[in-house]
Image (tube, rainbow, N blue to C red):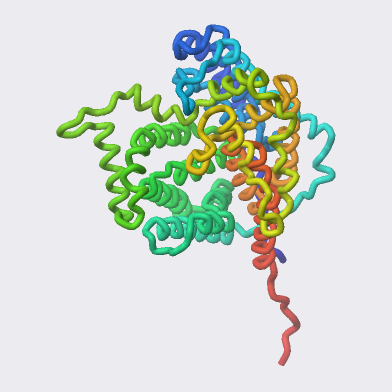
């Protein structure tokens, strides 16, 4: 008999009090209304503030629906809605201006209002495309794999992947590996820390683990945090934290507000001193040990927030705005609207040309465009940096802005509906309990990736997403099948 890895249905505690959750959501939005009227920065008109408040409600709605309905299809739109809420509708409280290479961007109130309106309609457009794809039953023509992997096996392999990935990055930081960063990136593709963490998290969330497994989950988060201090890259710890948050939302159908607080707290605390740390360390890769690096980051944090013998503690408001600047996309989108098509003509799909080359391996076409082609083009064309500067600084072109650049306001909504269809396709393939623990782990990794990738161009994520997910699916199938086989027991012989 094969080993059973049946996955329990969505936890009853996920929707124990659905009516209370809806009441809490409505009350929270009512309380938020006067806050949106009174407290955004002066950059936003009253109309822009009201639009943003409506956008906050609509962007959170898919997640609320999924939490209160355990039988509801897992919905990638819910994750992207959280990003839209954070990057657009919460950003109105800290965004004041947009810096370009020549100075501050000049953006009219009309463009800001149109930008917020487009961001407000983005989640409903994605959701509508997702829903219509379900009505069209696209799941009937898509593969529906069952990637059953025994809980203990997937947990142990996931732990190994996490430790292996963190070790490789630590050795590279120490200078003990004579390999280039691209090679480290290739290793990361074959053993991504986030996928490993998802493999650890899914069986634990499904009730297959004990107290020791819980310690492993939080121990891996701690190690990622330490490596983040050593490297000066906050995403090293943010990505596993996002996977943890999404795991509770999608697998257990519960919103872990404490996780949100921790996630935002990490950004708030670490972001203000990141630039100073990098200025001191990144040019001295072989001169500082890992312990010294982590100690330096901690010392910089202590001096910034607590002050020292010769310095005062930081201004809290300014530090919050410094950290929040990483989530500011309202004025960036408005800037694209301001200049398109008055200065830069609509592209009518030209920024998506990487997809013509995506299936071709680069070894057969070394001259094919990079997946970040649209991001690089937009960064130069819209004045964020010079062409030479793109070799050092990457400015993401969000999928909302890219849709507008190509097709205008109404056309962008149809493009976002198409992206919603892509979401539905992945939800049908992997976002099912029948996909098994292996399938759900890959799905959780995909949701985290598409959530972060939504603030980059469409090709940056989707250009290689299918190849990567197929590769991980094959690996998971092999992992499951090897352990499913049991030796045949024949008749006893003398």
The residue at 53%/7% (across/down) is: 46
Q: Quadrant of the N terminus?
A: bottom right
Q: Is residue 186 left or right of residue 349?
A: left
Q: Residue at x 51, y 40 (%)?
A: 388
In the rendered image, the quadrant that contains the C terminus is bottom right
Q: Is residue 107 above or below residue 307?
A: above
Where 242 falls versus 191 (above or below)? above
- The location of residue 406, given as percent across then percent down, is 71, 28
Left or right for 106, reference 142:
left
Q: Is residue 53 above or below residue 256?
A: above
Task: Give x and y (percent) for residue 30.
Answer: 54, 12
Viewer can see residue 71: no
Residue at the bottom extreme, as displayed: 494
> How far across and how far down the image is residue 268, in percent?
39, 32
Which one is nearer the viewer's eye here, 155 or 238? Answer: 238
Q: How many marks?
A: 0
Front residue of 272/287: it is 287
User: Residue at image x 45%, y 23%?
Assistant: 103
Kindly identify the residue that appears in the image at 45 percent across and 36 percent down: 263
When asked about the image quadrant of residue 81, the answer is: top right
Q: Is residue 472 visible?
A: yes
Q: Position of residue 474 (x, y in %)?
A: 69, 59
């Amino acid at each position: 008999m094969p080993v059973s890895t049946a996955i329990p249905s969505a936890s009853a505690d996920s929707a124990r009090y659905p009516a209370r959750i809806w009441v809490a959501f409505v009350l929270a939005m009512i309380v938020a209304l006067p806050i949106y009227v009174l407290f955004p920065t002066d950059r936003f008109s009253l109309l822009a503030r009201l639009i943003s408040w409506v956008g906050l409600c609509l962007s959170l709605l898919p997640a609320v629906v999924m939490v209160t309905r355990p039988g509801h299809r897992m919905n990638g739109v819910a994750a992207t809605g959280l990003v839209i809420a954070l990057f657009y509708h919460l950003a109105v409280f800290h965004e004041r201006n947009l810096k370009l290479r020549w100075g501050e961007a000049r953006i009219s109130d009309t463009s800001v209002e149109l930008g917020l309106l487009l961001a407000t309609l983005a989640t409903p457009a994605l959701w509508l495309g997702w829903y219509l794809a379900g009505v069209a039953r696209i799941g009937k023509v898509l593969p529906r794999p069952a990637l059953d992997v025994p809980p203990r096996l997937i947990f142990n392999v996931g732990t190994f992947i996490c430790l292996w990935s963190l070790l490789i990055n630590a050795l590279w930081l120490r200078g003990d590996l004579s390999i280039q960063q691209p090679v480290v990136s290739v290793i990361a593709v074959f053993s991504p820390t986030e996928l490993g963490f998802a493999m650890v998290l899914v069986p634990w969330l499904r009730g297959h683990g004990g107290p020791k497994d819980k310690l492993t989950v939080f121990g891996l988060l701690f190690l990622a945090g330490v490596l983040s201090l050593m490297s000066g890259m906050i995403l090293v710890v943010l990505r596993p934290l996002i996977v943890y948050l999404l795991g509770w939302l999608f697998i257990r159908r519960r919103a872990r507000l404490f996780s949100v607080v921790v996630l935002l707290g990490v950004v708030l605390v670490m972001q203000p001193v990141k630039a100073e740390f990098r200025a001191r360390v990144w040019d001295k890769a072989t001169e500082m040990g890992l312990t010294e690096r982590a100690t330096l980051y901690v010392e910089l944090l202590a001096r910034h927030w607590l002050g020292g013998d010769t310095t005062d503690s930081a201004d809290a408001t300014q530090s919050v705005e410094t950290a929040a600047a990483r989530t500011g996309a309202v004025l960036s989108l408005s800037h694209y609207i301001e200049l398109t098509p008055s200065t830069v003509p609509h592209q009518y799909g030209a920024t998506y040309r990487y997809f013509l080359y995506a299936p071709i391996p680069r070894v057969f076409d070394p001259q094919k465009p990079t997946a970040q082609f649209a991001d690089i083009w937009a960064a130069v064309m819209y004045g964020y940096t010079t062409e030479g500067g793109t070799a050092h600084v990457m400015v993401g072109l969000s999928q909302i802005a890219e849709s507008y650049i190509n097709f205008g306001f109404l056309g962008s909504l149809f493009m976002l509906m198409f992206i919603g269809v892509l979401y539905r396709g992945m939800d049908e393939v992997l976002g099912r309990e029948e996909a098994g623990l292996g399938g759900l782990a890959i799905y959780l990794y995909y949701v985290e990736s598409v959530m972060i990738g939504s603030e980059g161009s469409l090709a940056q994520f989707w250009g290689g997403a299918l190849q990567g997910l197929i590769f991980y699916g094959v690996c998971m199938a092999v992992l499951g099948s090897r352990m499913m086989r049991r030796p045949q027991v024949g008749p006893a012989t003398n």
